[in-house]
Image (cartoon, rainbow, N blue to C red):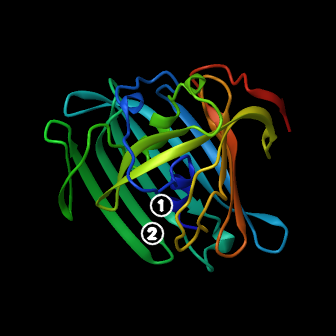
Amino acid sequence: MGFKKILIAFLLVVLVKPLSAGDDFCGIRNYAFQSGEQISFTVFYNVIGLYVNAGNATFTANAEKLNNTPVYHLVGAGNSNSSYDWIFKVRDKYESYIDTANLQPIKFIRNVDEGGYKINENVTFNRTANTATSEKGTVKVPNCVQDVLSAIYYARNIDFEKYKPEDRIPFTMFLDNEVYNLYIKYLGRETIKTRFGKFNAIKFKPLLVKGTLFEGGEKMTVWVSDDANHVPLRIESPIVVGSVKVDMMGYKNLRYPFSSLISKR
């Protein structure tokens, strides 16, 4: 499985007709994570009724400076397990540098190696001119646009108390030299059991566009922790062949107590 698909699964695989991002997604400040946070995930693949461990992903956030601007340096790295490399080898790394003041991306780097298909991309965002510049050229972008990695951390700071089940929370994202209008469909709260433990969780069901891996429609479900951290806990979705499940399996240096955890397995 491509790591790009895993990343997008974290609250953002929702390509639809244009929507206005609205004021709710401009000017969000960070109350959900802190420097030094690390969250790890295991990717399980099911094709014959049995989920097998197929790969892993790790996300980290660290405070740094970029051109004298205080930033969070976000890194998402994903690998297929060595035993599956002969089928489809994945060695992917995504990086985003976001302004600590407003969580807007300044630089985005992608190094992808998926079954021999390689992408090396470096994007610089100019917030004054509202542009994104990469090896493919310069594209005009709207205010508050996110990249595929920064959007995950930005979404963790949503105030879910403002919304009721079935509400759609729109935002825009820059990916593959294009601007996409996206939304997150909020479904409410429930208790969930994962490979890590039992949690109180916030639930989403993104609307997917049919592609090479995921089926279209509202078939993917995402859960994040129902506490101040808003940690992604589980993603489930059918894919073209079989289905996939991604579970949070480890964490370090969360900003707040992991109060949504009811019991550990």
Query: For residue 112, what is the image quadrant?
Result: bottom left
Q: Nearer the viewer, residue 108 or 142?
A: 142
Tell me which numbered mark, 2 or 1, is placed earlier along the sequence. Answer: 1
Query: Is 56 above or below relative to 258?
Result: below
Percent position (x, y) of residue 181?
39, 51
**Mark 1 lies on residue:** 92
Q: Residue at x 48, y 49 (%)?
A: 76
**Mark 2 lies on residue:** 113
> How far apart, in angstroms, are the residues tagged by discs 2 and 1?
6 Å
Bin the neighbour count of mark 1 within 10 Å (Cα to Cα): few under 14, some 14-19, many 20 and up.
many
Query: Is 57 above or below relative to 89?
Result: above
Left or right: where does residue 158 sit relative to residue 189? Answer: left
Disc 2 on helix, strand or loop? strand
Left or right: where does residue 188 sit relative to residue 228? Answer: right
Asked whether disc 2 touches disc 1, contact meaning CB atoms under 8 Å apart, the reply is: yes
The quarter of the picture where the N terminus appears is bottom right
Q: Residue at x 37, y 46 (%)?
A: 172
Percent position (x, y) of residue 218?
63, 57
